[in-house]
Amino acid sequence: MPRIVCICLSHWPVTRLRRAGLAPEGGPMAVAAEGPGGLRLLALDPAAQALGLRPGEPLGRVRARIGVPLRVYPAEPAADRDALLRLCRWACRYAPVVAPFGPAEASDGLYIDVAGASHLCGGEARLVDDLAGRLARADIPARIALADTPGGAFALARHGGADRIVVPPGGAAGALRDLPVEALRLDPGAVAGLKRLGLRRIGELDALPRGPLARRFGAALLLRLDQALARRPEPLAPLTEAAEYAAARGFLDPIGRQSDIVRTARDLMAEMAPRLERDGLGACALRLALHRVDGVVRALDLGLSRPERDPERVAALVSLRLDRLGRALDAGFGFETVALAVTVTGAMPARQTDLGAGSAGDGVGFLADALAQRLGRALLRLEPRASHLPERAGRGVLWVAGGGPGSVPRRSTGRPSALPPPSPSGGLEYSCIEAGNTASGSVAGPLSRAGEGSGPSGCGTTGTRGDGALDPENSRPSPQPSPARERGHVAFLHQDRGSTELGEQRCAQGAGHAPAIPSPWPDHLPPRPLVLFPRGEAACDVLSTVPEGPPRRFRWRAQIHRVAHAEGPERIEAEWWREPGEPRDYYRVECEAGHRLWLYRDGPHATDRPAAWYVHGLFA
């Protein structure tokens, strides 16, 4: 069931002028617009309302009636609408579905569908209090109500008895019973006709037979009544930004094959590429919208690691994305329209290239984008941390272009045309390489003596005024971290010293002798396993030739492993400044079955207490 928050903005044109610094704070003020018989009042501030003025009155009659000076400003509907849309984008911090008022509301405001999102603020009441507090600190007068439907929430926010109203689920009928009939967003003629019949309250109207009402006032009256009382659905039209770079193509004969969709996406990108090149921009994120014959729209968001405007590369990424969807795409009877829009742009200035040569890092960036579309998981890289213990020596951070070794150089971002599009999981889509066959494992690297680095930040931009208060009109919602990052999937291209050097040599050979990318990992330590477990897994029934020597046989994961070759030990002391512990002796062993494991003995061997053994990682 939807849960709709309605925000009715009191005298929004006046609020916009004062927030923009175009009108003084004190004194009665009004906004006038052209109407029947000349200029009429459109919006008033509280000081003007205290003088007995009401919206809709002729301006000439008002000036003759009041004895105090009244500052009047012309109406600017376009500026008011733009400011309202900026406020709607700010409101996306509470829920993704936000819609401004339409013509039926005949006022300024917006709806927010907070179903499934109110728990992030501690409940519906706390969400409403937080929203009201932020608007009050931003000097935006508003009346807020939360109900099951947009119609019910609007009626309570506009005509309720309090500035904040929260109706429990299913309580719309009781909450709306005593409200006036004009709260149903009816035509003024219908409201006047109801009042002539003595019907002034919604409860009185709902108690009458429906047939005579429909014959007298039409089906629109019953529709608005049922929508307010949650008897009929009223879907919202979410806020959508018009993309500056977009193209679409319609088909008389609907298409459904993947090859046709990919070919169309390539043609649409080729149509937008000249405009992007003219402005020195490239696409950092795209949205492919597939409109089915039955009206269903399937939107696919593609996130890129660097600005791109090559139609062939975009088509290849679309093909990989469709490969991952497979039958889940569900073309039905076919797609009659295919649209491609660039939702996020980045700077991509023209550069001189040699014939047949690509720039350094192009292959790595395209590999990251291909993995993002094919696997659909977050591509992370390993970052060293200052710790002796292997499980603390590295952490996974989001891989971005130019964010670390193995990534392409970062370029300055251009002016974005929109916020990054959310994926179904809640964040931009990336890709992840899972090393090894163990889902519970993570990637490990050499121990680092360097300081602890910080990964790329995921903070958004919050607008503030000069006094430090929140400015909702100029604020943007902060992108949420990708759920894939929370799951702990980690991946990177080259792990130990040998593979890193080999990867740098290949990169230099394939990119016109590009300079090798320096590695932050120390090169004086023995090799580390490709897969490192979060904690050691116990190895039982361990047999060794000497008490302090390497194991010869052990049981791990319900299987007996016989060691064919062992190297070590490598002693790693415990970090006494964090917590006391025994020193570990690590061995690299190869079993007769071909498994290469990283084992360690926890502490020295004693006669009365045999040392415990653990498997901590897997080599390739």
Image (cartoon, rainbow, N blue to C red):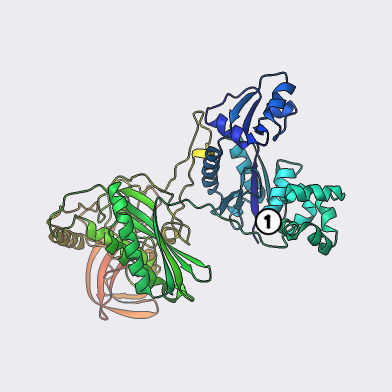
Residue closest to the eye, 262 or 152 = 262
Q: In the image, what residue occupies the spot 29% across and 61% down? A: 311
Q: In the image, what residue occupies the spot 32% across and 65% down? A: 315
As displayed, is residue 27 above or below residue 308? above
Q: Residue furthest front?
A: 37
Residue closest to the eye, 248 or 471 = 248
Would residue 271 be found to the left or right of residue 5 on screen? left
Picture coordinates of residue 333, whole percent (x, y): 48, 76
As displayed, is residue 202 above or below residue 48? below
The answer to whether one can see residue 264 in this image is yes
Would residue 108 be found to the left or right of residue 312 on screen? right
Q: In the image, what residue occupies the spot 87% across and 49% down? A: 198
Instruction: For mark 1, give the secondary structure.
Output: loop
Picture coordinates of residue 527, whole percent (x, y): 23, 62
Query: How dense is the environment of label 1, judged by Cα within 10 Å: few (below 14), some, or many (20 and up)?
Result: many
* Rendering quarter of residue 354: bottom left
Residue closest to the eye, 430 or 433 = 430
Q: Which residue is mark 1?
A: 149
Would residue 234 be found to the left or right of residue 470 on screen? right
